[in-house]
Amino acid sequence: MFGGLFFFNDNIVRALLARETRMTNAYEERMATLRTEIDRLKTGQTKVRETVSAQVKALLTQQAELTGRFEQLQPLLEKARDMGVLTKANPTGASDDASAAGREPSALAPAPNSSSSTTPTRHPEDISALSLRHEDVSEIAGLVLPSIRKSVDMVSDEQTSTIAELARTTQSRADHLAAVLGSVGIRVEETKPAIGGPYIPADGELSFSNSLNLLDQALQTYGRLKTKSARVPLADPLPGARVTSTFGVRPDPFFRRAALHSGVDLAAPTGTLVRATASGKVVSAGEAGGYGMMVEIDHGNGFSTRYAHLSEIDVASGSAIKAGQIVGRVGSTGRSTGSHLHYEVRTDETPVDPERYIRVGRKLAKL
Protein backbone atom coordinates (compact mmCIF):
# COMPACT_ATOMS: atom_id res chain seq x y z
CA MET A 1 0.00 0.00 0.00
CA PHE A 2 2.81 2.33 0.86
CA GLY A 3 4.61 1.35 -2.35
CA GLY A 4 1.60 2.29 -4.42
CA LEU A 5 1.24 5.59 -2.68
CA PHE A 6 4.89 6.35 -3.24
CA PHE A 7 4.56 5.50 -6.92
CA PHE A 8 1.51 7.68 -7.16
CA ASN A 9 3.18 10.62 -5.44
CA ASP A 10 6.27 10.25 -7.63
CA ASN A 11 4.15 10.51 -10.75
CA ILE A 12 2.53 13.62 -9.42
CA VAL A 13 5.92 15.18 -8.69
CA ARG A 14 7.23 14.32 -12.13
CA ALA A 15 4.10 15.78 -13.70
CA LEU A 16 4.39 18.93 -11.65
CA LEU A 17 8.06 19.27 -12.56
CA ALA A 18 7.32 18.78 -16.24
CA ARG A 19 4.56 21.35 -16.06
CA GLU A 20 6.85 23.79 -14.28
CA THR A 21 9.52 23.21 -16.89
CA ARG A 22 7.05 23.89 -19.69
CA MET A 23 5.84 27.07 -17.97
CA THR A 24 9.41 28.20 -17.38
CA ASN A 25 10.34 27.57 -21.01
CA ALA A 26 7.23 29.39 -22.22
CA TYR A 27 7.96 32.32 -19.93
CA GLU A 28 11.56 32.49 -21.13
CA GLU A 29 10.36 32.41 -24.74
CA ARG A 30 7.94 35.23 -24.06
CA MET A 31 10.69 37.22 -22.32
CA ALA A 32 13.04 36.65 -25.25
CA THR A 33 10.35 37.77 -27.66
CA LEU A 34 9.66 40.83 -25.52
CA ARG A 35 13.35 41.70 -25.38
CA THR A 36 13.55 41.37 -29.16
CA GLU A 37 10.52 43.64 -29.56
CA ILE A 38 11.98 46.18 -27.14
CA ASP A 39 15.29 46.13 -29.02
CA ARG A 40 13.40 46.55 -32.29
CA LEU A 41 11.42 49.51 -30.92
CA LYS A 42 14.54 51.13 -29.57
CA THR A 43 16.28 50.65 -32.90
CA GLY A 44 13.24 52.07 -34.71
CA GLN A 45 13.10 55.09 -32.44
CA THR A 46 16.80 55.73 -32.94
CA LYS A 47 16.42 55.50 -36.71
CA VAL A 48 13.39 57.83 -36.67
CA ARG A 49 15.22 60.35 -34.50
CA GLU A 50 18.26 60.14 -36.76
CA THR A 51 16.01 60.68 -39.79
CA VAL A 52 14.38 63.71 -38.16
CA SER A 53 17.79 65.13 -37.26
CA ALA A 54 18.98 64.72 -40.86
CA GLN A 55 15.84 66.36 -42.22
CA VAL A 56 16.11 69.28 -39.80
CA LYS A 57 19.74 69.75 -40.76
CA ALA A 58 18.80 69.74 -44.46
CA LEU A 59 16.07 72.33 -43.83
CA LEU A 60 18.48 74.57 -41.93
CA THR A 61 20.93 74.29 -44.82
CA GLN A 62 18.19 75.21 -47.28
CA GLN A 63 17.20 78.16 -45.11
CA ALA A 64 20.83 79.34 -45.10
CA GLU A 65 20.86 79.07 -48.91
CA LEU A 66 17.70 81.19 -49.18
CA THR A 67 19.21 83.79 -46.87
CA GLY A 68 22.40 83.77 -48.96
CA ARG A 69 20.31 84.23 -52.09
CA PHE A 70 18.60 87.25 -50.61
CA GLU A 71 21.96 88.78 -49.68
CA GLN A 72 22.97 88.48 -53.35
CA LEU A 73 19.63 89.80 -54.53
CA GLN A 74 19.20 92.75 -52.16
CA PRO A 75 21.63 95.13 -53.97
CA LEU A 76 19.80 94.49 -57.24
CA LEU A 77 16.43 95.13 -55.59
CA GLU A 78 17.72 98.44 -54.26
CA LYS A 79 19.08 99.30 -57.70
CA ALA A 80 15.74 98.42 -59.31
CA ARG A 81 13.91 100.57 -56.76
CA ASP A 82 16.24 103.52 -57.43
CA MET A 83 15.51 103.18 -61.14
CA GLY A 84 11.77 103.08 -60.57
CA VAL A 85 11.40 99.50 -61.85
CA LEU A 86 10.67 98.19 -58.37
CA THR A 87 8.49 100.43 -56.24
CA LYS A 88 7.11 100.11 -52.73
CA ALA A 89 3.65 99.78 -54.20
CA ASN A 90 4.92 97.26 -56.73
CA PRO A 91 7.53 94.95 -55.21
CA THR A 92 7.52 92.39 -58.02
CA GLY A 93 7.59 94.88 -60.86
CA ALA A 94 4.82 92.96 -62.57
CA SER A 95 2.08 95.58 -62.40
CA ASP A 96 2.46 99.31 -61.95
CA ASP A 97 -1.09 99.53 -60.62
CA ALA A 98 -0.64 96.89 -57.93
CA SER A 99 -1.03 98.14 -54.39
CA ALA A 100 1.01 96.40 -51.71
CA ALA A 101 2.09 97.32 -48.24
CA GLY A 102 5.55 98.57 -49.16
CA ARG A 103 7.39 95.43 -48.15
CA GLU A 104 9.58 92.93 -49.92
CA PRO A 105 7.64 90.07 -51.55
CA SER A 106 7.67 86.93 -49.43
CA ALA A 107 9.39 85.00 -52.20
CA LEU A 108 12.29 87.47 -52.18
CA ALA A 109 12.64 87.89 -48.43
CA PRO A 110 15.05 85.67 -46.47
CA ALA A 111 13.80 82.78 -44.42
CA PRO A 112 13.36 83.59 -40.71
CA ASN A 113 16.56 83.09 -38.75
CA SER A 114 15.93 81.15 -35.58
CA SER A 115 19.38 82.06 -34.27
CA SER A 116 18.17 85.60 -33.65
CA SER A 117 15.74 84.34 -30.99
CA THR A 118 16.55 84.82 -27.32
CA THR A 119 15.82 81.11 -26.74
CA PRO A 120 19.03 79.03 -26.80
CA THR A 121 19.28 77.10 -30.06
CA ARG A 122 19.98 73.36 -30.25
CA HIS A 123 22.19 71.73 -32.81
CA PRO A 124 20.08 69.62 -35.22
CA GLU A 125 21.81 66.38 -34.24
CA ASP A 126 20.73 66.96 -30.63
CA ILE A 127 17.11 66.22 -31.47
CA SER A 128 17.90 62.56 -30.73
CA ALA A 129 18.43 63.58 -27.10
CA LEU A 130 15.09 65.39 -26.74
CA SER A 131 12.60 63.85 -24.32
CA LEU A 132 9.95 63.16 -26.97
CA ARG A 133 7.69 60.15 -27.21
CA HIS A 134 8.24 57.84 -30.15
CA GLU A 135 4.78 58.81 -31.44
CA ASP A 136 5.76 62.50 -31.35
CA VAL A 137 9.00 61.92 -33.23
CA SER A 138 7.20 59.75 -35.77
CA GLU A 139 4.62 62.48 -36.36
CA ILE A 140 7.38 65.06 -36.83
CA ALA A 141 9.13 62.81 -39.33
CA GLY A 142 6.00 61.80 -41.20
CA LEU A 143 3.87 64.95 -41.22
CA VAL A 144 5.49 68.14 -39.92
CA LEU A 145 8.90 68.13 -41.63
CA PRO A 146 7.61 67.12 -45.10
CA SER A 147 5.12 69.99 -44.90
CA ILE A 148 7.85 72.46 -43.93
CA ARG A 149 10.14 71.12 -46.64
CA LYS A 150 7.38 71.53 -49.23
CA SER A 151 6.85 75.15 -48.14
CA VAL A 152 10.58 75.92 -48.31
CA ASP A 153 10.79 74.36 -51.78
CA MET A 154 7.85 76.51 -52.90
CA VAL A 155 9.55 79.65 -51.56
CA SER A 156 12.76 78.71 -53.37
CA ASP A 157 10.94 78.15 -56.67
CA GLU A 158 8.86 81.30 -56.27
CA GLN A 159 11.99 83.28 -55.48
CA THR A 160 13.61 82.20 -58.75
CA SER A 161 10.47 82.79 -60.83
CA THR A 162 9.87 86.21 -59.26
CA ILE A 163 13.41 87.34 -60.05
CA ALA A 164 13.03 86.07 -63.60
CA GLU A 165 9.77 88.05 -63.94
CA LEU A 166 11.47 91.20 -62.60
CA ALA A 167 14.28 90.68 -65.13
CA ARG A 168 11.73 90.36 -67.95
CA THR A 169 9.92 93.49 -66.77
CA THR A 170 13.17 95.46 -66.64
CA GLN A 171 14.23 94.21 -70.07
CA SER A 172 10.82 95.12 -71.48
CA ARG A 173 11.17 98.66 -70.12
CA ALA A 174 14.67 98.89 -71.57
CA ASP A 175 13.40 97.77 -74.99
CA HIS A 176 10.52 100.25 -74.82
CA LEU A 177 12.84 103.07 -73.77
CA ALA A 178 15.26 102.22 -76.59
CA ALA A 179 12.40 102.25 -79.11
CA VAL A 180 11.13 105.62 -77.87
CA LEU A 181 14.58 107.16 -77.99
CA GLY A 182 15.12 105.71 -81.45
CA SER A 183 11.92 107.38 -82.61
CA VAL A 184 13.58 110.80 -82.16
CA GLY A 185 16.82 109.72 -83.81
CA ILE A 186 18.74 108.84 -80.67
CA ARG A 187 20.93 105.84 -81.38
CA VAL A 188 21.23 103.25 -78.62
CA GLU A 189 23.24 100.08 -78.37
CA GLU A 190 21.57 96.68 -78.63
CA THR A 191 19.56 96.22 -75.45
CA LYS A 192 19.60 92.43 -75.52
CA PRO A 193 22.89 90.54 -75.04
CA ALA A 194 24.12 88.27 -77.85
CA ILE A 195 23.70 84.85 -76.23
CA GLY A 196 22.75 81.32 -77.32
CA GLY A 197 23.46 77.59 -76.99
CA PRO A 198 21.54 74.34 -76.52
CA TYR A 199 18.86 74.06 -73.87
CA ILE A 200 20.06 72.11 -70.83
CA PRO A 201 17.74 72.21 -67.79
CA ALA A 202 19.52 73.63 -64.74
CA ASP A 203 19.16 72.76 -61.08
CA GLY A 204 17.72 75.25 -58.60
CA GLU A 205 20.93 77.10 -57.78
CA LEU A 206 22.03 77.38 -61.42
CA SER A 207 18.55 78.59 -62.37
CA PHE A 208 18.64 81.19 -59.59
CA SER A 209 22.15 82.31 -60.58
CA ASN A 210 21.10 82.64 -64.21
CA SER A 211 18.01 84.67 -63.25
CA LEU A 212 20.19 86.90 -61.09
CA ASN A 213 22.62 87.49 -63.97
CA LEU A 214 19.79 88.30 -66.38
CA LEU A 215 18.32 90.76 -63.88
CA ASP A 216 21.71 92.42 -63.41
CA GLN A 217 22.22 92.75 -67.18
CA ALA A 218 18.72 94.15 -67.69
CA LEU A 219 19.20 96.70 -64.92
CA GLN A 220 22.55 97.79 -66.37
CA THR A 221 21.00 98.26 -69.81
CA TYR A 222 18.01 100.12 -68.44
CA GLY A 223 20.30 102.28 -66.31
CA ARG A 224 22.41 103.27 -69.31
CA LEU A 225 19.32 104.19 -71.30
CA LYS A 226 17.84 106.21 -68.44
CA THR A 227 21.13 108.09 -68.08
CA LYS A 228 21.10 108.82 -71.78
CA SER A 229 17.44 109.87 -71.79
CA ALA A 230 18.06 112.22 -68.84
CA ARG A 231 20.26 114.34 -71.14
CA VAL A 232 17.72 114.40 -73.95
CA PRO A 233 15.27 117.36 -73.79
CA LEU A 234 12.03 115.39 -73.55
CA ALA A 235 10.18 117.25 -70.78
CA ASP A 236 7.69 120.08 -71.13
CA PRO A 237 9.13 123.45 -70.00
CA LEU A 238 5.62 124.79 -69.30
CA PRO A 239 3.18 121.91 -68.66
CA GLY A 240 -0.40 122.84 -69.51
CA ALA A 241 0.51 126.02 -71.38
CA ARG A 242 -1.36 126.88 -74.59
CA VAL A 243 0.57 126.63 -77.86
CA THR A 244 0.20 129.91 -79.73
CA SER A 245 2.67 129.21 -82.53
CA THR A 246 4.11 125.91 -83.73
CA PHE A 247 7.47 125.04 -85.26
CA GLY A 248 7.95 125.71 -88.97
CA VAL A 249 7.25 128.37 -91.57
CA ARG A 250 4.76 131.05 -90.53
CA PRO A 251 4.03 134.74 -91.20
CA ASP A 252 6.46 136.85 -89.19
CA PRO A 253 4.45 138.65 -86.45
CA PHE A 254 6.12 141.98 -87.28
CA PHE A 255 6.90 141.89 -91.03
CA ARG A 256 4.00 139.61 -92.03
CA ARG A 257 6.26 137.74 -94.43
CA ALA A 258 6.93 134.02 -94.43
CA ALA A 259 9.69 133.12 -92.00
CA LEU A 260 10.98 130.07 -90.16
CA HIS A 261 9.79 129.83 -86.60
CA SER A 262 12.62 127.86 -84.97
CA GLY A 263 10.72 126.79 -81.88
CA VAL A 264 7.30 126.66 -80.27
CA ASP A 265 5.54 129.53 -78.46
CA LEU A 266 3.82 128.69 -75.16
CA ALA A 267 1.52 131.37 -73.73
CA ALA A 268 1.66 131.93 -69.96
CA PRO A 269 1.36 134.86 -67.53
CA THR A 270 4.47 136.90 -66.83
CA GLY A 271 6.46 135.40 -64.00
CA THR A 272 5.41 131.79 -64.63
CA LEU A 273 8.30 129.47 -63.77
CA VAL A 274 10.20 127.93 -66.69
CA ARG A 275 12.01 124.63 -66.08
CA ALA A 276 14.88 122.89 -67.87
CA THR A 277 13.74 119.98 -69.97
CA ALA A 278 16.91 117.92 -69.40
CA SER A 279 20.14 118.03 -67.45
CA GLY A 280 23.11 119.88 -68.91
CA LYS A 281 25.26 123.00 -68.67
CA VAL A 282 24.23 126.64 -69.18
CA VAL A 283 26.22 128.04 -72.08
CA SER A 284 24.57 131.47 -72.14
CA ALA A 285 22.22 133.45 -69.90
CA GLY A 286 21.30 137.05 -70.73
CA GLU A 287 20.29 139.38 -73.55
CA ALA A 288 20.28 137.69 -76.98
CA GLY A 289 18.88 140.11 -79.59
CA GLY A 290 15.43 139.14 -80.84
CA TYR A 291 15.31 136.35 -78.24
CA GLY A 292 15.28 138.97 -75.49
CA MET A 293 16.35 137.50 -72.15
CA MET A 294 17.39 133.95 -73.01
CA VAL A 295 18.95 130.88 -71.43
CA GLU A 296 20.69 128.26 -73.58
CA ILE A 297 21.60 124.84 -72.19
CA ASP A 298 23.98 122.31 -73.74
CA HIS A 299 22.79 118.77 -72.96
CA GLY A 300 25.59 116.90 -74.70
CA ASN A 301 25.33 114.44 -77.62
CA GLY A 302 24.57 117.40 -79.91
CA PHE A 303 21.41 118.45 -78.02
CA SER A 304 20.76 122.00 -76.79
CA THR A 305 17.68 123.98 -75.76
CA ARG A 306 16.81 127.70 -75.68
CA TYR A 307 14.33 129.49 -73.40
CA ALA A 308 13.58 132.99 -74.73
CA HIS A 309 11.62 136.20 -73.98
CA LEU A 310 12.15 135.64 -70.22
CA SER A 311 11.32 138.37 -67.71
CA GLU A 312 13.90 136.98 -65.24
CA ILE A 313 16.84 134.58 -65.44
CA ASP A 314 17.57 132.37 -62.43
CA VAL A 315 20.77 130.62 -63.60
CA ALA A 316 24.26 131.73 -64.52
CA SER A 317 26.38 130.86 -67.54
CA GLY A 318 28.58 127.85 -66.85
CA SER A 319 26.36 126.37 -64.14
CA ALA A 320 25.24 122.73 -64.15
CA ILE A 321 21.52 122.15 -64.59
CA LYS A 322 19.27 119.27 -63.63
CA ALA A 323 16.08 118.32 -65.44
CA GLY A 324 13.15 120.22 -63.91
CA GLN A 325 15.34 122.97 -62.42
CA ILE A 326 14.01 126.54 -62.72
CA VAL A 327 15.94 128.52 -65.33
CA GLY A 328 13.84 131.69 -65.43
CA ARG A 329 10.37 133.22 -65.66
CA VAL A 330 8.02 133.86 -68.55
CA GLY A 331 8.08 137.40 -69.97
CA SER A 332 7.85 139.34 -73.22
CA THR A 333 11.38 140.63 -73.83
CA GLY A 334 12.92 140.88 -77.34
CA ARG A 335 10.78 140.44 -80.47
CA SER A 336 7.59 139.48 -78.71
CA THR A 337 3.96 140.54 -78.95
CA GLY A 338 2.93 139.27 -75.51
CA SER A 339 3.85 137.20 -72.50
CA HIS A 340 4.98 133.78 -73.62
CA LEU A 341 7.93 131.37 -73.73
CA HIS A 342 9.75 130.73 -76.99
CA TYR A 343 11.22 127.24 -76.56
CA GLU A 344 13.71 125.64 -78.95
CA VAL A 345 15.28 122.19 -79.26
CA ARG A 346 18.42 121.93 -81.41
CA THR A 347 20.41 118.93 -82.63
CA ASP A 348 23.91 119.79 -83.83
CA GLU A 349 22.86 123.47 -83.86
CA THR A 350 19.93 122.75 -86.17
CA PRO A 351 16.47 123.62 -84.79
CA VAL A 352 13.95 120.75 -84.72
CA ASP A 353 10.29 120.54 -83.72
CA PRO A 354 10.18 120.70 -79.87
CA GLU A 355 6.67 119.24 -79.71
CA ARG A 356 7.94 115.97 -81.13
CA TYR A 357 10.28 115.62 -78.18
CA ILE A 358 7.63 116.70 -75.69
CA ARG A 359 5.31 113.97 -77.01
CA VAL A 360 8.07 111.39 -76.64
CA GLY A 361 8.65 112.62 -73.08
CA ARG A 362 5.00 112.05 -72.24
CA LYS A 363 5.31 108.45 -73.49
CA LEU A 364 8.38 107.90 -71.35
CA ALA A 365 6.62 109.31 -68.32
CA LYS A 366 4.16 106.41 -68.56
CA LEU A 367 6.93 103.79 -68.32
Image (cartoon, rainbow, N blue to C red):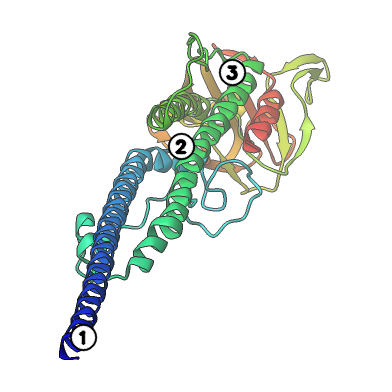
Do the residues bearing badges 3 and 1 touch, measured as CB atoms within 8 Å?
A: no
- The three-letter amino acid code for the residue at tag 3 is Arg
| Mark seen at residue 4 | 1
Which circle's residue, 3 or 2, is located before the other in the chain? 2
Q: Nearer the viewer, mark 3 or mark 1?
A: 1
Element on which disc 2 rests: loop
Indicate the quadrant containing the C terminus: top left, top right, bottom left or bottom right: top right
Residue occupying image coordinates x 37% and y 50%: 110
Left or right, 327 with respect to 262, comes to left
Disc 3 secondary structure class: strand
Q: Is residue 258 left or right of residue 55?
A: right
Image location of residue 25, percent across then percent down: 23, 67
SS state under label 1: helix
* Lower position in the chain sequence, tag 1 or tag 2: 1
Whole-Å distance between the Cαs marked 3 and 2?
Answer: 18 Å
Q: In what quadrant of the picture does the N terminus appear?
A: bottom left
- Foreground label between 3 and 2: 2
Task: Determine which quarter of the picture holds residue 165.
Answer: top right
Position of residue 300 measured from the top left corner of the image (x, y, whole percent): 46, 19
Q: Which residue is mark 3?
A: 346
State whether residue 312 appears in this view.
no
The numbered disc on residue 322 is 2
Q: Is 12 above or below relative to 213?
A: below
Residue drawn at (40%, 43%) of the image: 78
